[in-house]
Amino acid sequence: MNLLELFTDLLGNTESSLRLFLPELILCGTILVLLALRIFSGLDKIPSWIVALAGSGLALYYAAPWVLLEGTVKSQEIFTGMLLYDGVTVFFRGLLLFFAILFILLTRVTELVQSEDDADIATLVLGATLGMCLMASANHLLMIFMAVEMASVPSYVMAGMLKSRRRSSEAALKYSVYGAGTAGVMLYGISLIAGVVGSCHLPTIAASLADPSLASQLPTMPLVLGGLMLAVGLAFKLSAVPFHFWCPDVFEGAPAEVGGFLSVASKAAAMALLVRVAVGFAAPAGGGVDVASSEPIVAPVVATAAFASQVEGAVTLTAADTAAEPDGLLGSVRYFIVVLIALVSAITCTFGNLAAYGQTNIKRLLAYSTIAHAGYMMMPVAAAIHILGEAAAGYSAAAGDAVASVLLYTAIYLFMNLGAFAIVAILRNNVGSEEIRDYAGLVQTSPGLVICFALILFSLIGLPPLAGFVGKYAIFYALVEGNLISLLIVGGLNTAVSLFFYLRVIKVMTIDPPPEDRGPVSLSLISLPGIYVTLITAPVLLLIIQWDGLVRMAQAACRALVQ
Amino acid sequence: MDDSTTDDTGRGNDRPRLGVAESLLATIPLIAFLVAAYLTVTGRTLRLVWSWVPSLQVEASFQLDGLSLLFCLLISGIGVMIFVYAPGYFRGHRDRWRLYTWLLLFMAAMLGLVTADNVIMLFVCWELTSLTSYLLIGFKHESEKARAAALQALLITGAGGLCLLAGLLLLSRIAESQELSTILGAADALKQSPLITPAIILILLGAFTKSAQFPFHFWLPNAMEAPTPVSAYLHSATMVKAGVYLVARLSPALTGVPLWDNLIVAAGGVTAVVGGAYAVRQYDLKRILAFSTISALGCLMLLLGLGTKLAIEGAMLFLLSHALYKATLFLVAGAVDLGTGTRDIRRLYGLFASYPLLAAAAILAACSKSGLPPFGGFLAKEVVYEATTTLSGWATWATTIVALLANACFVAVGGLAAVHPFFGKPGEPSVVPHESPPGSSQLPAGGAARLLGWRLVFPPVVLGLLGIVLGVLPSVTALYFISPAMSAVMGQDIGVKLSLWHGFNLPLLLSVLTVAAGVGIYVQRRRFVAWVDAGGILRYAAEGGPQAAYRGSLALLKFTATWQTRILQNGRLRLYLITVLASFAGLVIAAFLYRVEYTQFGKLLNLRLYELVFPVLILAALAMAVTSTSRLAAVCALGVIGFALAMLFVLFGAPDLAMTQLAIETLTVILFVFVIYRLPRFATLSSRGVRIRDAVVSLAVGGMMTVIVLAATSAHAPSRVSQFFVDNSLAIAKGRNMVNVILVDFRGVDTLGEITVIAVAALGIFSLMRLRLEPSQVPAEAAADRTETTLAANGEDASSPSEQAAPDKPSATGRGE
């Protein structure tokens, strides 16, 4: 094709894509406005957090996660297949933008930053959120890499927010060294895959691998390695064991608010990416996707795509007997995805809970709890793929529902962990410490806050009737549906272990006598931080009454994923 | 004593007047009781369904059948008495409203638990009862023991609850429904499913932990740290019966599965004997009652496990009469504790003069507990003996002996808990001398005891009297309580006839034997205790063993946690990197071991001599870098490696790549040199062992990288791109330098974009330089970017040789800048 055709094509494609890309565009615009405001002397009086709030609010309005309930989201590729617009995109975009709003409010409530850094944090948050939105909708290996980096680089800076604190700088350094290392490994992996298969477009790769005539010619070892290396990048973002080391150190060094951001938004985006890579690869894209692109490679691929290859799953390509299967390599590929995710999630979950047990710093404890929860959240992905493997003909809606449990858990997790970190930040401002033992006897002077914290911690355990139970139930249900009984038992045992360390925090706050050298710490719920905490805790307490809406939203988001 | 005037005068700070709300608390359970009673009398079963989460097929559904109603009556009826009693017991306590709230919450959860039809609803209520139990046991939170006991109870029942959830989910998956009523209807499907074994084990773990079955029973005596009204309500009458309820509820579907029956019978039998014998050994009134509760729960399990019609009948009767007399005894114990300030039976005697009404209630309860006619306990015991003696084979012997032992202990416990405190003399019952408490010389005489309000006396008297009513009106008991409950447990309509007098038969003989044995144990308590302690086996089973296992596992958990934190998460970046690299290398090596392909590597050895020069140079430089004691020399050696690599690129036809490599290598060396001057003096800090470890890890990682590169280069990828450029460079773009053509023609737009990026970056750097930051204020971002650039660039360089024909992405140059 000549240049003119190319341009016309590209223009048409871009025009149709832009409408679906509006929330991200608004974020970009807001970032530019934030930067510009500081240049012009008259405008720098406008508080940047208000601008950021307005920007993310507008973006949330256009991201419109509520349309999921109406069932009008139609899956389609945008920007010549670089991104995918579907229910999962809509769900996670809504979630991330909603979290961005809450986070900006939190930084105001806890007075994290002085006025001159105000614009910095707003810019960084929006930048990271932009990257995370892209992670949730990536449909192309390079897009995945770009999105991960876009989300990571602002995070590194945020971890080092407190410039005067050595620990904060150390955290930022460790985080960025880790991030850079894993990003390099991931990029290497991507280049191996792309070199072997000849494309970075996920459905195209999948189709190549599933194509029986082509699959037998593909060299398997580079694929295996590429898959493993791509998995390293994912594991870093998920803080899965053994790529989790940055997490406790960074959480301890960074301000609690930033810890909350990393633990919620970053985790949500990483889960979205895992869903994209794992489930997207193990299930055919199906007819549900409208290919906006007219790029010649893409169209026929998507139509036929029965396919394979989650990264690690490529291991199975070496299995000689698979060639005989009419389904191509799909069956054994799925089997290996299940084994790998199950293994990693079980190790991550167990390790996180065990390690949390011995912590004395509340932020380190929450960091390990984050790691453990990442383990729980990965489990249903394995279950979903297991279900796909078991469904002999066609694709069971149960797989979509299993993935939906991840979405549900992420949404609930947002409130639980944001609440926990917000309280830690508020207590830091008032108690001046983040050691658990310094919380002793807080219930006597700040009962409201302590009750909220206790509710959140109980919810993190997963005890009914709090929201955490809803999430855990959904996950366990998915594991039962997926027939992964061993994972179910691992999850159950871990929940029991997690009782210990969460309860210890509650015990210290409510039962131990307050230290004598601490001044009176009186935090009423009728104060700005108090109201914030109450508003975050309320859903944790009340979700049990009406959780059908959230479940339906999550299920609607995942329906197109496996149809 | 119990005259109501003390109540109403309310003098002094310690005896404030009750508020209206507080005094009317009991109306809440009363309403529930009346509803349950109405439903019981009219014999209706109800089913209530609300839509809760239709998208997950979870409904808020409740079903009230005979079994549920029996429990509802117990929960709400005893609840009424507890809420009459508690305001008297906690009069003026600072936190009493907190306690009332939790008690009410508990009652609601318990009612929900026994009426829920949806398994999720059941589980939610189940865990709610655990949670409220935790809060209630820890109510006296100044006490370290109370907190430990509360935590222990929550951990054990909470963990059991999680097992239960898993088990229930498995059941509902097999039966394809979450409604208990449907699950019970799918008995055949359940019995044939392979999942039934894990499901049964998980469900029974839940039931056994909750109902304090051996070996999970030890939390219950410790839970006696709770205030007495709580113990009476939760830990004897209601909550601990939840496990029994669950087993009874699932009986119609699961009875007949050998695993189910055997586990329940075994656990129940052991629990019944261990708990009963150990109860006699205790001195604390509440611990005596707690162990006898454990024994009673064991009997209930045993009967449900036997599963015959008589056994179920006995279980239901025993359940009812036990709840009544045990609650009475607990309430009496609480009142005595409040009045005299002690619960130690060595210091309690002759209190009849002070508390005649309490004594009457206690005696009523003790008679029922001992199974004397005409009390409810007698009815129950007769049916139980009838049930055990009509079994076949050795089972009849075993179960009869277990029942006999347990019942004899009940008689003795009745004596210890009810007779001795009121009618005993000092020195009775026979006390092991050296265990005598130090303060025993200053016993509060009967007369010194405090006066008690009517609220503390009325409830035990009423509950004690109900025990007689049960026995005197056996037909009413059978019609309204036992038959409907049995119909629910057996899954078919059953009519039961009860009577006090069965004629002279084997059960009656056994009853006489029981009472005689019980009195014997009571009188010869010292000898019995010595016998129980002989060999220490029973002691080990009742207290030592399971508790030691619990403590041991906690300690192990803590040890593992701290150990792994110390080893793995020690804050040192280099050790983290070692762990990460080693595990990644391990993964890759495992992948290779899984399926090795050596075949393709052979032809790589096809080298020319001059090509070998550079690898040798690299190896020599490597050896120098590793062994050198001068940093500068080491850095230079690293530089040599880089330059040699660049020469290799030149040899293999990638001059552009070589250029990039040279530029980056030079820059790296220069940067290194800058940094070196700021480092402390070179010293050998690491030990030999550490260096060997590092060497092993390095070799593994190096080997892994080698393998990766070999695998990548040996791949014959169906290249789609390079041939296109070969064919079209000259034809379309009229250029002979393919790389140039790619950069400026085929990928012209990309190049333009990259130039823009570089320009923007340059602008940024320019403005940074204009800012003239202090050196210490260089933002972390810059450092982060730099690190990333180096690593990413290195990664790309290593991968590039595999695709020589593909254009080297100019982005590397851009980043290098």
Image: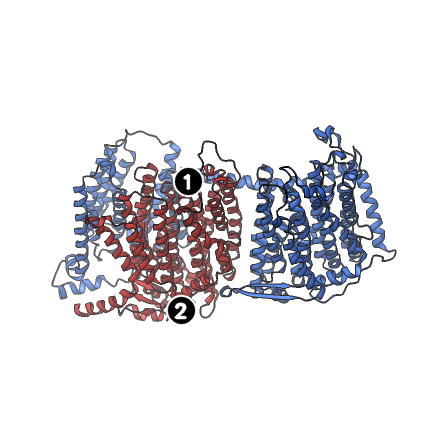
Can residue B284 be seen from the camera position used here?
A: no
Chain identifier, colour red: A
Identify the residue shown where x is 51% and y is 66%.
B54
Identify the residue shown where x is 68% and y is 64%.
B39
Q: Nearer the viewer, residue B180 or B83?
A: B83
Q: Position of residue B737 (x, y in %)?
A: 13, 58
The tint of chain B in the picture is: blue
Query: Which numbered marker is on residue A71?
Result: 2
Where is B447 relative to B303, above or below? Answer: above
The residue that label 1 is drawn on is: B569
For residue B48, what is the image quadrant?
A: bottom right
Q: Quadrant of the C terminus of chain A?
A: bottom left
Q: Is residue B156 left or right of residue A466?
A: right
Q: Is residue B372 left or right of residue B745?
A: right
Q: Chain of mark 2?
A: A
Amino acid of disc 1: Gln
Can residue A404 be seen from the camera position used here?
A: yes
Q: Which element type, helix, strand or loop, lies under badge 1? A: loop
